[in-house]
Image (cartoon, rainbow, N blue to C red):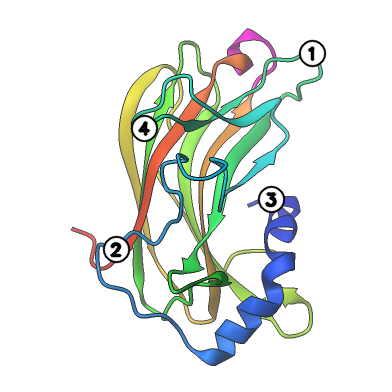
Amino acid sequence: MKKKFLSALVVATLTLAVFSFFGGQAVMAEDENLLLNASFDDGEHIDYWVNDGNATFIWIADWHPYRGSWSFGVGNDLEHAEAGAFGGCFQVVCDPDDPDSFYMAAPGETFIFKMWIKGEDNYAGKASLKLEFFGYDRRFGLADDPLASFQSKVYTGQFEWLCETVSGTAPEGTVCVVVSGVSEDMPIGPAGGSFAWFDEASLTTGPVW
């Protein structure tokens, strides 16, 4: 995960994370979706998500969602685009009983992250899902690098909507869980302008079948 994104996403809520870290954790039922605004159809559509990256287009649009009215897309086709660009939608998992606090993962707790992905004609980036666990450094605050990071299969080229999955287990010391749908290594020009789309996300706990 890029450090720029991490600092922008968590600094504002670091105090809440530390309070939660020393104050206990939520207990979740298996199969309960921990993500808020999981289909990008609530509120301002980007609510509870952070869009980040250096790709030209990183946005919510109603062009061709998998379900509902909106989905998240990444493209890279303007004259000021950067070669090898990346972009994605990220969510720090919140306590379902207190959306202003991080969800506190128990050591050894397994998470299953699913999201639908689509690649347009000539899509030339690398689309995937990521599940990451971050710890807390008593001297410097939330750590820049994850304690553990898991990535799904990577897709490129044209492909229709498919449901991808990545799972991982929280290590000792986890303070927050971050999920993301990302498009990386995007070229400049027409090929870069072909979008990857993400929709209908879910994050659950429990065994992986």
Kind of element beneath mark 4: loop
Foreground tag (2 vs 1): 2
Q: CA distance from mark 1 to mark 3?
A: 24 Å
Q: CA distance from mark 2 to mark 1?
A: 44 Å
Residue denoted by label 4 = 68
Q: Do residues under tags 2 and 3 come within 8 Å of each other at their CB atoms?
A: no
Residue 73 in percent (x, y) is at: 54, 29
Foreground tag (1 vs 3): 1
Query: Which amino acid type corresponds to the residue marked 4 in the rendered image?
Result: Gly
The residue at 23%/61% (across/down) is 208
Q: CA distance from mark 1 to mark 4?
A: 32 Å
Mark 2 or mark 3: whose residue is earlier in sequence: 3
Q: Which mark is residue 46?
A: none
Q: Do residues under tags 4 and 2 come within 8 Å of each other at their CB atoms?
A: no
Q: Which mark is residue 32?
A: 2
Foreground tag (3 vs 4): 4
Residue denoted by label 1 = 79
Q: CA distance from mark 3 to mark 4?
A: 30 Å
| Quadrant position of the C terminus in the picture | bottom left
Q: Do residues under tags 3 and 4 come within 8 Å of each other at their CB atoms?
A: no
Query: Which amino acid type corresponds to the residue marked 2 in the rendered image?
Result: Glu
Q: Which mark is residue 2?
A: 3
